[in-house]
Amino acid sequence: MHDVGIIFAGFFVGLIVGLTGVGGGSLMTPILIFFFGVKPYLAVGTDLLFAAVTKLGGTFSLSRQNLVPWRVVLTLLAGSLPAALLTLWALREAGPSSQGVQQLMTSTLGVALLLTAAAMFYKALRGPQQPRMLAEEALAQATRPRHPALPILFGALIGTLVTLTSVGAGAIGVTVLLILYPLLPLPRIIASDIAYAAPLTLVAGLGHASLGSVDWPLLAKLLAGSLPGIWLGSRLVTRTPERVIRSILSVLLAWAGSKLVLI
């Protein structure tokens, strides 16, 4: 029954990701900690590789549709990948299973979830945005940030957050992109977020694996459930009100974040 529960959890999170585009790290890590008693450092490491496999597939699909603005992706990675490697080095020095590091992970994860819930609720109140088509010249203008240093700075912050908690590359990343690139259509914002999160979560996940922070059998069971969940969610997304989904998800994330902060 325990294995069935893990596969169902993977299916549930895959379904949510398919419906909303976010929630992989935000939901999977607290589910592993609260419902299956997985240690925080193992939950984070396993979830990072879980997210990497999913987002690599998404990047391939989006790039074939020519939706990924690679200039934006590379600028974010210039900040996030070095920050991820530096955070992994700090974890290696401190020991990922030490009590202090686990407390830092749970507290940071809680704050990250509360921020994600706030971003999700804000988007639910605003309602779904209508995508706008851009000509090539306008697209080039839209991929210029408000300031050249800001994407690198925010990329570094998200890289640190993702490596510590496995959360941040979803709704928080999308929110940052909306602030930095206000002229970029929402489909390209989401494509940018998925494309830069794929190598970031892969690097962070492999780093955690080198520290012994990945449960490989658990990862296999989660993916066995998530892949059909993502397939189903992507087909239900046009039939389910986005505002309802995001409202429910924001409440769920706020609950999980509050519980982690109060541990």
Image: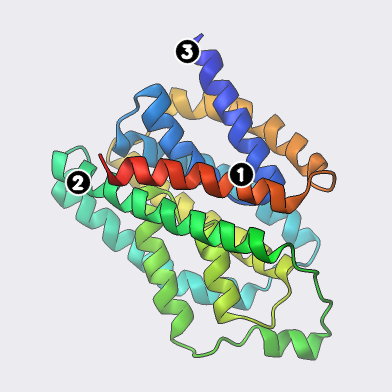
Instruction: Examine the rendering and report whether any part of residue 118 can be seen.
Output: yes
Q: Earlier in the sequence, mark 1 or mark 2?
A: 2
On screen, residue 93 versus residue 226, left or right, reads left
Q: Are marks 3 and 2 in contact (CB under 8 Å)?
A: no
- Look at the image and name its color scheme: rainbow
**Does residue 248 sit above or below 126 in this rendering?**
above
Disc 3 from disc 2: Cα separation: 28 Å
Residue 162 in picture, x, y percent from top left: 41, 55
Q: At x 33% / y 34%, what residue is drawn?
A: 42
Q: At x 77% / y 43%, what residue is drawn?
A: 234
Q: Which mark is residue 248?
A: 1
Residue type at mark 3 is: His
Disc 3 from disc 1: Cα separation: 26 Å
Q: Quadrant of residue 74?
A: bottom right
Residue of label 2: 101
Q: At x 55% / y 80%, what residue is drawn?
A: 180
The local crowd at label 3, few if under 14, some if 14 to 19, many if 20 or more residues have their Cα within 10 Å, is: few
Q: Quadrant of residue 130?
A: bottom right
**Foreground mark, 3 or 1?**
1
The local crowd at label 1, few if under 14, some if 14 to 19, many if 20 or more residues have their Cα within 10 Å, is: some
Residue type at mark 2 is: Val
